Amino acid sequence: MEIIETFSSEETYLFGKQIGENASPNAVYALGGDLGAGKTVFAQGLAAGLGIKDPVSSPTFTILQIYDGGRLPFYHFDVYRISDVEEMDEIGYDDFFFGGGVSLVEWAELVEEILPEETVYINIGKDPDRGFDYRKITVRNSEERL
Ligand code: ADP
Ligand code: MG
């Protein structure tokens, strides 16, 4: 387990960027955190780290947003609206998780059972006592989560 503290959105962006720069093909990141935690900021950094120039937004209204043109393809999932994991089969998720790109999954707990063993779990949390711009980012592997 790794804990990173950030004190501005820029720092969270840069942490995401660092992850993107170092991500291997087929890496899957499960990204958690409340609304306004900084998930989109992190995703934008990750995409930048992969060399993606297109603007990255909150996926919310689409389950999957695909960004090409970087060092590796970037698959940004938001599975919030999924009512059954089978919907992930329908979109052919394994072509993405195992297709050589980098996947980031928001609301991953809803599709827990299909996440690969190697999934890296990243949670962004606030702590009001530490100030408005403070974020605690926790990085865990699947064993450390239990
Ligand atoms: P989410 O996608 O989790 O709903 P966003 O990334 O859209 O959240 O928004 C995070 C908001 O919090 C932005 O307005 C950002 O500027 C602000 N913010 C303040 N401090 C931080 C920080 N340390 N890390 C990330 N975002 C921060
Ligand atoms: Mg968002």
Image (tube, grey):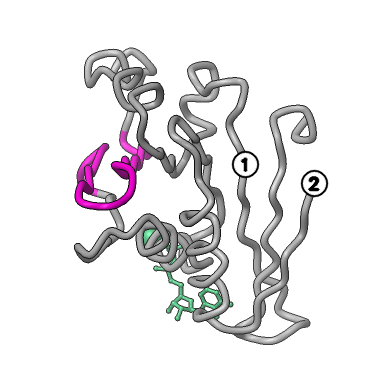
Compared across the picture, whether 142 is left or right of 8 comes to: right
What is the x, y in percent for residue 90?
A: 23, 15
Looking at the rendered structure, the kind of residue marked 2 is Met
Q: Residues within 10 Å of mark 2 (few under 14, many from 20)?
A: few
Q: Is residue 96 above or below residue 89?
A: below
- Side of 118 relative to 107 (left or right): right
Looking at the rendering, the stretch of residues picked out in magenta corresponds to: 61-81
Q: Amino acid at mark 1?
A: Tyr
Contact, mark 2 vs mark 1 (Cβ under 8 Å)? no
Q: Residues within 10 Å of mark 1 (few under 14, many from 20)?
A: many
Q: In this rendering, would 136 be left or right of 33?
A: right
Left or right: where 121 falls relative to 95: right
Residue 30 percent coordinates (x, y): 53, 40
The residue where tag 2 is placed is: 1
Label 1 CB-ligand 1 distance < 8 A: no
Q: Image quarter for residue 56?
A: bottom left
Q: Quadrant of residue 54?
A: bottom left
Q: Secondary structure at mark 1?
A: strand
Q: Secondary structure beneath disc 2?
A: loop
Residue sitting at x 36%, y 58% = 47
Q: Residue at x 54, y 33 (%)?
A: 109
In the picture, the quarter occupied by the C terminus is top right
- 132 falls in the magenta region: no
Residue 14 pos. (x, y %)? 52, 72
User: Whole-percent x and y of residue 67?
Assistant: 22, 48
Residue 121: image tag: 1
- Quarter-wise, where is residue 46 in the image? bottom left
Badge 2 or badge 1: first in the primary sequence? 2
Q: CA distance from mark 2 to mark 1?
A: 10 Å
Residue 33 versus residue 119 in the image, above or below:
below
